[in-house]
Amino acid sequence: MNNIVSLVTGAGGEIGHSLIEALAERGIPILATDLRPLPPPIARRCYRVIVGDITEPELHGQLLQIGFRRVFHLAAVLSSQAEREPEAAHRVNVEGTLRLLQTTHRMAKRHGEPISFLFPSSIAVYGIPSLDEKRRAGRVREEQYLTPMTIYGANKLYCELLGLYYARFYRRLAPEPEAGWIDFRALRFPGLLSAFTVPTGGTSDYAPEMLHAAAQGKPYHCFVRPDTRIPFMAMPDAVHAMLLLAEAPTSALRSHVYNVTAFSASAEEIATEARRLFPQAHITFEPDPRRQAIVDTWPEALDDSAAQRDWGWAATHDWERTFSEYLASNIRRRYQRAIT
């Protein structure tokens, strides 16, 4: 077994399930944490599971006692829920991340070598001021439009900066060039499409929600306009990107923060595809003003050329493969099992 123990926080969430499966298949021992017990099939993939709050000192004491050599920090309050509970979102998204960075620094000092800290950021860090500007902007680069309008976006952007601070400041203080510092790496994800977990709390969740509802024969009222366009990627590519960046040599990286993406689509295009794949689908559009206002500030497309250049990133799931091969077959199988 690989001895690089990987800590996965927020392991019970949408990305966590798929990431744990991928790590386990590679023989990597997984130390998982979540606020609630993990489903037994996921828990069995881990060598240790801790149930606890990422903001509480008791959890971090246990993490230090067990030890870890790499971090995938997934624990977060997602965008729509964060808007309803901004103080709770700040506590988990910012204070939890700060405490984990401190814990990781202590662990790195103990080992006398850097610890890689993978942080999933979001297109929510961007804030484009108008729809006209959004359409003109095209593929947005990492340094553009960093004026998020949501607490979630502000949390994510600030945590990127916290990660940069810990990476740079503590590296300068390390007694040796490679000793005891945090190798912080962040990915700005677009909307994620998963066949195996039901979305919870994300503002881009209208896309997977359409498909999960259609497969069950349930009507779905989409909370954004038909012309709403943002970038997406399939969950297998999200996990692939995290593992690829985690394993990239430090010398190859010219940045700590990278965009990744696969394709862009409008809500109407996704609805049309859902109706094609599931003829029983009944999808209508009933935009929610608050959620619509959020996605209107997100880019229509991301420029991920830096990730392509530095660590060989390339999406493996285009539109056709995402919907016809990955989503349709797996979602259909999921609900057929539930019916039978």
Image (spheres, rainbow, N blue to C red):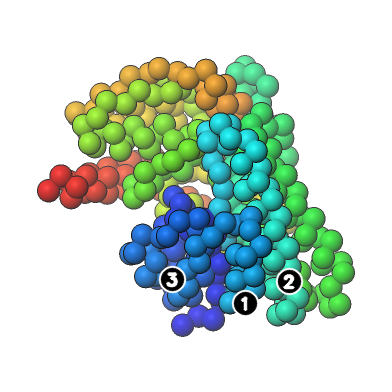
**Residue name at image x 73 percent, y 40 percent:** 143
Query: Badge 1 local density, few (<14 within 10 Å), some, or many (20+)?
Result: few
Identified by mark 1, the residue type is Gln
Where disc 2 sits, the SS reads helix
| Residue 158 showing in the rendered view | yes
Q: Nearer the viewer, residue 197 or 89?
A: 89
> How far across and down, in percent of the image, does residue 147 sit?
72, 31
N-terminal of the pair, mark 2 or mark 1, is 1
Query: Badge 2 local density, few (<14 within 10 Å), some, or many (20+)?
Result: some
> Which residue is disc 2 drawn over?
106
N-terminal of the pair, mark 3 or mark 2, is 3
Mark drawn on residue 46: 3
Query: In the shown orientation, is residue 164 left or right of residue 153?
Result: right
Q: For the residues marked 1 and 3, what is the alpha-carbon distance in whole angstroms?
A: 17 Å
> Which residue is disc 1 drawn over?
65
Q: For the residues marked 2 and 1, what is the alpha-carbon distance in whole angstroms?
A: 11 Å
**Residue name at image x 44 percent, y 63 percent:** 20
Where disc 3 sits, the SS reads loop
Identified by mark 3, the residue type is Cys
Where disc 1 sits, the SS reads helix
Name the outermost residue toward the left.
Answer: 340
